[in-house]
Image: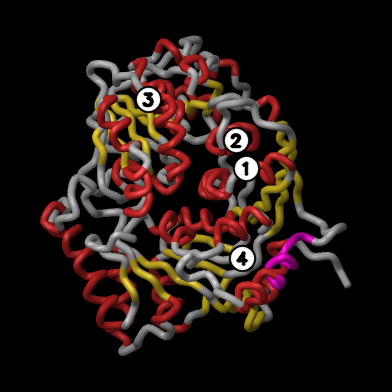
Amino acid sequence: MKPLTLFEKIWAAHEVHRDEDGQSLLYVDRHFIHEGSRTPYKQLADRGLKVRRPDLTFAVPDHYVATTSRDFADVDGEDRKDMVASLTRNAAASGVVEYGLQDERHGIVHVMGPEQGLSLPGMLILCGDSHTSTHGAVGALAFGIGASEVGHVLATQTLWQRKPRTMRVLIEGELAPGVSGKDVVLALIAQIGVNGATGHVIEFAGSTMEALSVEGRLTVCNMAIEAGARAGMVAPDDKTFAYLRERPHAPKGEAWEAALERWRGIVTDPGAIFDREVFLDATTIEPMVTWGNRPSEAVPVTAAIPDVAAVEDPTQRGMLLAALDYMGLKAGTKLADVPVDYVFIGSCTNGRIEDFRAAAAVLRGRQVAPGVKAIAVPGSGLVRAQAEAEGLDRVFTEAGFEWRFSGCSMCLAVNGDTVPPGKRSASTSNRNFVGRQGPDARTHLVSPATAAATAIAGRFADHRALGG
């Protein structure tokens, strides 16, 4: 029998039919929806269709909700209010479970899903959001889909897809103290570029990934798509199983034991062939900071802005020079000399309990620099409650951070949390595109610990020098 990759095993298990043109009809195990489902639900209503499997669909408002309170009235803008309200109406009418604003389990969909055990090894998981790749960290195949595809899944519990190619990223070596999963994935994207994995599903493997916590793996898979990948995956192992055990939607009792036996086989076979392989030496990775408008434009926090005028390709050189101009930076400037105005810790990339512990370790006993607005936004209500049980909220507030409720918040400028024009933000989110955090906002991607050190220094800082 031909050796198969982790991805190929899951794809084959979900392939209902393959057309002559090579497209496959896939069965969907789990479908997450958020406020963006308003249009797909309308499409179903216009055609007289119902949600096929409401028991496999789960709703959560996250993109457009306010994080200053749990009050629906604080949602920014009438159209956004309607998007949030329509999710509640549609979920109730179709029998879909919603994790609403007043639910203690509410959170960003890519934090809440794994947290509730809704994301499990071997599943095919879809959501109308590009960072659905996050769920691949537990050994699932998970990717984002468009609005019309959301409607198709709601109506049929299936989706037509063309099979992507495979790519293995081998990350080997022990990470230096203070280097996180966020730094790993930024270093990878800096190495292969934002199109380096286009058309592929990445399997992250190697000793470094094995050593990372599941929360660290969730961060890495979250940003797989920033390298152009269709999805990111990590083979399930004992860490995965320990993370999932006793989660509300995880199997229980004998069903758990049966699931474990099945999950242990959902790994890449020895001798399986990937279409492409990439190697990353983890021992060389340092805390990273992006300086431009793409996640690939990243260097160590201890470094200087590179001389992009020396880039040979004229198209690339033009893009990089434009990025420097937009960001208000000059080649040769040390990152440690670049001041910041805003610091954001949160998002589906870095809104988990480990992220707040890492940041709190840096902040404890210190103060945010004058003139810096710093906000901390837990990725779910349960993360918030856990952090408060550990006293982390007091560490943040005593340092000068705002301690918020769960939601996507300042990751993207659609909920009232924005960075003003021309202001500079150190953000633990996943995208530094032009205008991502607000019109003419300047976004730098960092890890939670680097964000905390930067908030204290008022400019980009190496948290290792502070003992964090």
Tell me which segment is drawn in magenta: 261-268
Residue at x 24% of width, y 54% of height: 65
Camera-side residue of 240 and 332: 240
| Mark positioned earlier in the residue sequence (2 or 1) | 2
Please, what is the three-letter code of the amino acid marked with disc 2? Val
Element at badge 3? helix
Q: Which mark is residue 121?
A: 4
Q: Main secondary structure of the magenta part?
A: loop
Q: Which mark is residue 184?
A: 2
Q: How many marks?
A: 4
Q: Name the residue tied to disc 3.
A: 363
Residue at x 34% of width, y 40% of height: 436
- Report crowding for label 3: few under 14, some 14 to 19, many 20 or more residues within 10 A (C-alpha): many
Q: Position of residue 98 (x, y in %)?
A: 31, 70
Residue at x 38% of width, y 49% of height: 383
Q: Position of residue 259 (x, y in %)?
A: 64, 73
| Mark positioned earlier in the residue sequence (1 or 3) | 1
Element at badge 2? helix
| Mark positioned earlier in the residue sequence (1 or 4) | 4
Give the distance between the C-alpha atoms of the residues marked 4 and 2, in whole angstroms: 23 Å
Q: Name the residue tied to disc 1.
A: 212
Q: Position of residue 305 (x, y in %)?
A: 50, 16
Element at badge 4? loop
Residue at x 56% of width, y 66% of height: 120
Please, what is the three-letter code of the amino acid marked with disc 4? Pro
Q: Are marks 1 and 4 in contact (CB under 8 Å)?
A: no
Q: Is residue 346 left or right of residue 257?
A: left
- Report crowding for label 2: few under 14, some 14 to 19, many 20 or more residues within 10 A (C-alpha): many
User: Which color scheme did the rendering employ for the protein?
Assistant: secondary structure
Please, what is the three-letter code of the amino acid marked with disc 3? Leu
Q: Nearer the viewer, mark 3 or mark 4?
A: 3
